[in-house]
Each structure stands twice: as structure tokens, then as C-alpha cells.
Amino acid sequence: MNNLSIIVSSTRPSRIGHHVTRWVQEQADPEQWQVKVLDLAEIGLPFLDEPDMPANGNYALPHTQAWASEIFGSDA
């Protein structure tokens, strides 16, 4: 089983990402994909608060470590 994470990236009140997310979920074969939705509006990550560049992979803050864990656990 593969892990598919769908990131709903818009946080605006009038966003339409949930419609796209629903469509992608419907297209994913449940025998091949375990789908997880990561909604940035619900996760509430602060903007640019890590002391190091994200590309270095040195995450100091708990919320960034949790986010990285979600992303690294995905196959697509």
C-alpha cells in the first residue's frame, strides 16, 4: 500500500481546494493508495520561524518536526 498525502495549500476563507482534494481522493485506487489530507488551514504552521533553512533538514521546533514527519511518511 502506498501513502498519498494531499496538501490543501490555500488558507483563504473563499478557497476551493477542498473540491480538488475530493476529486483526487475519488481518483485514487483504494487498493493501491492510503490517502491522507494535510490541510494547511487546520495545521496552522507559522511562517518562516525555523532558525535554519528547511533544505538542511534541521528542524528545531516541534510543529515543524511534526510536519516533516507527515511529509516524509508519504510516497506521493
Image: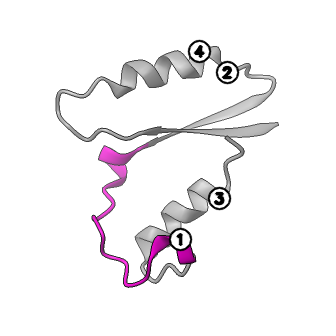
* Viewer-proximal residue among 41 and 57: 57
Please tell me whether mark 1 or mark 4 is closer to you in this view. 1
Measure the alpha-carbon separation of dots 2 and 1. 29 Å
Task: Report x, y in % for residue 48.
Answer: 30, 70
- Please tell me how crowded label 3 is: few (under 14), some (14-19), or many (20+) other residues with Cα within 10 Å: few
What residue span does the magenta drawing correspond to?
A: 39-56
- Please tell me how crowded label 1 is: few (under 14), some (14-19), or many (20+) other residues with Cα within 10 Å: few
Is the residue under label 1 in contact with that under label 2 (CB below 8 Å)? no
- The kind of residue tagged 1 is Ala
- The disc, 3 or 1, on the residue closer to the chain's N-terminal end is 1
Measure the alpha-carbon separation of dots 4 and 2. 6 Å
Measure the alpha-carbon separation of dots 3 and 4. 23 Å
Identify the image quadrant of residue 5: top right
- The kind of residue tagged 4 is Glu
Query: Relative to 12, is 29 on the left or the right?
Result: right
Is the residue under label 2 in contact with that under label 4 (CB below 8 Å)? yes
In the picture of the structure, the residue carrying the numbered disc 3 is 72
Please, what secondary structure does the residue beneath circle 4 have? helix
Q: Residue at x 77, y 38 (%)?
A: 2
- The disc, 1 or 4, on the residue closer to the chain's N-terminal end is 4
In the picture of the structure, the residue carrying the numbered disc 2 is 28
In the picture of the structure, the residue carrying the numbered disc 4 is 26
Measure the alpha-carbon separation of dots 2 and 3. 20 Å
* On screen, residue 67 above or below 53: above
Q: Residue at x 58, y 56 (%)?
A: 70
Please, what secondary structure does the residue beneath circle 3 have? helix
Please, what secondary structure does the residue beneath circle 1 have? helix
- The kind of residue tagged 2 is Ala
- The kind of residue tagged 3 is Phe
Measure the alpha-carbon separation of dots 3 and 1. 13 Å
- The disc, 2 or 3, on the residue closer to the chain's N-terminal end is 2
